[in-house]
Image: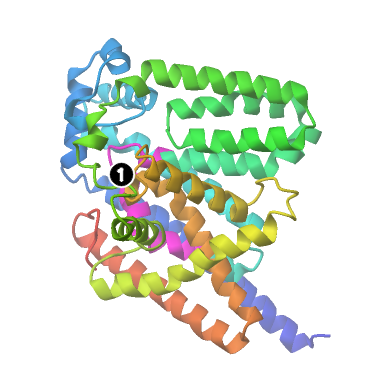
Amino acid sequence: MLSDNQLTGHSVRQNILKYAIYFGIFWYVLLATVNYLNQRPLWGDEEAVFSSIQAFSTRQIFHEHLLGYQVFPRLYFFIVKEFSQMFHFHVLSLRFPSFVCMMTAFGLWLRLAGYELKNKTDYLAFVLSWTASGMLIYYASELKQYSMDVLTGAVYVWFIYNEEQLRQGHRKKYFLILMVLPFLGLLSYPAFLFSLIVLYNLLSSRRDGRSMGGYGISLLAALGLAYYFDLRHNARDVYTDGVLKDYFISFQSVGAFFQTLGEGMTNLFSRWLVEQPRIIKKIGIFFMVFGLVKLFSGFFACIRKEKHLVKTVHTLAFVLFMALFCLGALKKYPFIVPRTVLFFCPFVLLLTIKGLTALKNINKYVYRFVYAAYFIFLIFLTLGLTRLIFTKHSVFQPII
């Protein structure tokens, strides 16, 4: 048993960690808010999206290609246009939906992390991973759909974790959510990946024919609407002649295959924090390798425990990774471009922490040293991003 002094010391440490977590949450919100309020000028893709927002009528939004080789979920595009129009297209109004989406996604992922990270130290590391992520801060205020992708991913993960509880205790609520979920695909294309995972779980469990039938009808309806009003009007040459043409798995040669696969893997697991100077990126790759290892080891360790359903971050991340690889190989979705797979970022951050904590099983001293180094790294990046955001506009690839 612990002595009174040990109990007191433990209680003090837990309180310190609790307040550190609160402060970390506050700091991420502060950094994202300041970056949003900086009102940097529209650039690149934002300018291209804005040209369509200004020029298109409601009918054109749902029946024509967007200008500037842009691919953007049309219902979400419509919401952005209608909202920003009330404020004469002020830059803050154009980016406000993205800001709301990312803040909501952050709140949901904090709750989801609580399902997996019971230790306050691990939970703090997850929070600091957000404050140290230049991408999760930057895309909270860009006129694109990527923060919505993070939000819809979080909603699906929340549902998957709570599906059984909802099914048993809140039958009507469960059925309503199940019917609505597929229509998130009208706001975010990656939502359809998550929809298929939910469908797989329903088919594999074989417990509720009414739910399976209703969900299947909703998914087909959402796919039909998305195709008719959205997907068929996306510029086909974005992938063949546009800026994304080189961001797929290449089968031109063995060397090209491994080069593009390696680039995709690197982007999926190392480009979420800060990339410049290059030494920072290399350090980040070292830590994120633990997340990559956990991606595979976690799946094979958990799939049987989950009775071959996809029910936790471990199995979800692996299935999403394989789906992204297949879509990249088929040249249907550019998983080598980090921003288009931003929804995968929280999975990587969580898996990295799980991978680092797994070092306990190898050597506790190695675990303590590497984990402490990761904390120092995250704090250093957070301070660098803080200085950057408070002194100048943040950019897609921040140099700290």
| Residue at the farthest top position | 59
Boundaries of the magenta span = 126-148
Q: On the picture, is 23 further left or further right than 263? A: right
- The percent position of residue 16, horizontal first and vertical second, equals 57, 73
* Observer-nearest of 25 and 132: 132
- The percent position of residue 146, horizontal first and vertical second, equals 36, 41
Q: Is residue 89 visible?
A: yes
Answer whether residue 319 is magenta in the image: no
Q: Residue at x 32, y 73 (%)?
A: 282
Q: On the picture, is 173 further left or further right than 187? A: right
**Quarter of the rendering occupied by the N terminus:** bottom right
For residue 253, above or below residue 158: below
Q: On the picture, is 64 further left or further right than 201? A: left
Q: Dot 1 corresponds to which residue?
A: 141
Q: Residue at x 70, y 25 (%)?
A: 212
* Observer-nearest of 5 and 323: 323
Q: Residue at x 59, y 56 (%)?
A: 113
- The percent position of residue 374, horizontal first and vertical second, equals 45, 75
- The percent position of residue 134, horizontal first and vertical second, equals 32, 58
* Observer-nearest of 339 and 202: 202
**Quarter of the rendering occupied by the C terminus:** bottom left
Residue 284's image quarter? bottom left
Q: Is residue 22 visible?
A: no
For residue 319, above or below residue 229: below
Residue 266's image quarter? bottom left
